[in-house]
Image (cartoon, rainbow, N blue to C red):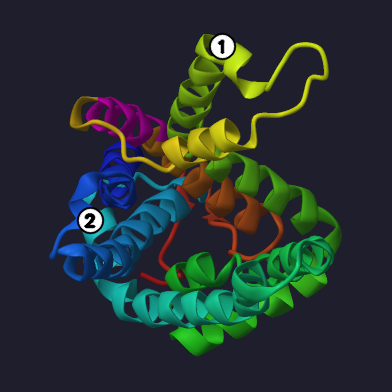
Amino acid sequence: VLVVAGLAAGLVGALGLLNNTSLLADDSQLILWTLIQIVPLAILPFLVGGALGYARELSVGGHPGWDTFFGAARKSYLSLFVAGIVIALITTLLSYPYALLFLFGDVSLLCLIMPITLLVLFIVLMFLEFYDIIIVAEGVGFLQGLQGSIAFVRKHLGVVVPFFVIVLLAKLIVQLPLFTAQMMRQVADLAANSSLYFNNTTTGALNASYVNATVALQSQPFSPASLIAIGALQVLVQAIVFAFVTSYKAEFYRWAGGMKPAKKITDFDYDFSDEKP
């Protein structure tokens, strides 16, 4: 179930690859860009809510199925959707200073602001990391989910930091197919035309015109065939990462005391009647 949900999440995430196609160069640019931003915000809360509901029941010893998935997804969708929009707005606002400096600022100031911006984003997103599992597991609204995440992280900061680093690294793995393709294209160009990078072999002076042309080449869109191959690999990686992160988060939240353990009746039977649906 989690892998299937991950495949669906991967298909949604693959929409972002449209940024690397020539489709965005025509009159449909604004429409495509809007879809790339809105579709994940609309669909991912359903997939995340269902997957976390499934993983939550599994972590407390239950026997979840597709009914568990769809029940949790429907119940938590609205809260997860609103919370996702709030977090997206927070992330955008925190990124604005760096974005403005990137467009209009000097390089030295940009190098100073970039690590500060990344550090602030790391801290803020870490404190909001558990809003989704809290909404699903506790059956609360988006505001209580965000507040509960902050309180949970403050209480368990020492163990949350390595958890969050692992989650970030796992999510970065999803971008490896696209990143690898971009690097391979650049390395291939360097290897094939290395002699053209220098005005002459005596002084070793850089051929600035050719360097600039090569940099511009890297921003060119991939061919449809290349993009399909990258997207297929990215979807498969996303499925694995999604299943891992979902299970890991539910189990970590339960381990840290975020979910009540099942009441033991005998050595082999458990009573889940006091668990929230």
Q: Position of residue 255 (x, y in %)?
A: 68, 52
Of all residues, the one furthest to the bottom in this rendering is: 143
Magenta residues span 226-237
Residue 63: image tag: none
Q: Please tell me whether residue 232 belongs to the stretch shown in magenta.
A: yes
| Quadrant in the rendering for residue 205 | top right
Residue at 21% across / 64% down in the picture? 29
Question: For the stretch drawn in magenta, what is the main secondary structure?
Answer: helix
| Quadrant in the rendering for residue 260 | bottom right
Quick one: 8 or 1, which is closer to the camera? 8
- Can residue 84 be seen here? The reply is yes
Kind of element beneath mark 2: helix
Q: Position of residue 93 (x, y in %)?
A: 58, 82
Q: Quadrant of the C terminus?
A: bottom left
119 in relation to 16, above or below: below
Residue at 71% across / 16% down in the picture? 200
Taking 163 as reference, is 35 left or right?
A: left
According to the picture, the residue beneath numbered tag 2 turns out to be: 25
Question: What amino acid is found at the position of numbered circle 1 in the picture?
Answer: Ala
- Can residue 267 be seen here? The reply is no
Taking 198 as reference, is 162 left or right?
A: right
Q: Position of residue 245 (x, y in %)?
A: 52, 45
- Binning the other alpha carbons within 10 Å of mark 1 as few (below 14), some (14 to 19) or many (20 upward) gives few
According to the picture, the residue beneath numbered tag 1 turns out to be: 191
Kind of element beneath mark 1: helix
